[in-house]
Image: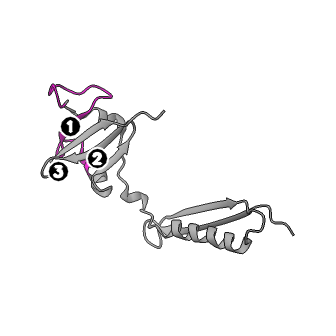
Amino acid sequence: MKVERIVVGKGKSVPVAGPDGEWSKVYYQLEAVPTEGEDVQATRMSLEGILDQWLSVETKPEAEIPKLDLAELDGLPWTTYKTKEPAKEGEAGWIFASTKGAEELAKAMQKSEGKLELGTYEYRFSGKDSQFISRKPKPVKK
């Protein structure tokens, strides 16, 4: 028998809101085309190892992920660095981390180690005590 391709899939379900609440399911599938003389068992085990590694990463329940509205973020009082004028759409700027309306953004940034990419911007904490949130446009990919 000639094996032309190997497909391995694995998944797991995790409780989102306790054992009696909602569950979240994650499923991954990989495919490999073995070369002539390649050990098919070793290839299968390698694919399973990759899937096991992906599934071992702890998934965060949706309830922990803050809901952010990009339009609301754009409406915050961003200030330019050079002119200290209100920043226009697509322009780099900063606000105080304590700015009203920026609470969920700050929470999301704390959960992602102080850096977050959303929409067309990259957000980071700045200042000696992380008292500011900076935004800059993400580089355009060619």
How far across and how far down the image is residue 62, in percent?
42, 57
CA separation, marks 3 and 1?
12 Å
Residue 17 lies in quadrant: bottom left
- Residues drawn in magenta: 81-106
Give x and y (percent) for residue 107: 27, 53
Predominant secondary structure in magenta?
Answer: loop
Q: Mark 1 points at which residue?
A: 94
Question: Counting residues from the N terminus, which is met first, the one under dot 3 or under dot 1?
Answer: 1
Badge 2 vs badge 3, beta-carbon distance below 8 Å: no
**Kind of residue at disc 1:** Trp
- At label 1, counting other C-alpha atoms closer than 10 Å, the crowd grade (few under 14, some 14-19, many 20 or more) is many
Q: Give residue 52's mark.
A: none
Mark 2 to mark 3 CA distance (whole Å): 13 Å
> Going 36% across and 40% down the picture, which residue do you hit?
69
Q: What residue type is labelled 2?
A: Leu
Q: Nearer the viewer, mark 2 or mark 1?
A: 1
Q: Where is residue 97 in the image (x, y as percent from the top left)?
A: 18, 45
Which residue is identified by label 2?
A: 105
The dot on residue 130 is: 3
Q: Tag 3, which secondary structure?
A: loop
Asked whether, in this view, residue 11 is left or right of residue 38, the answer is left
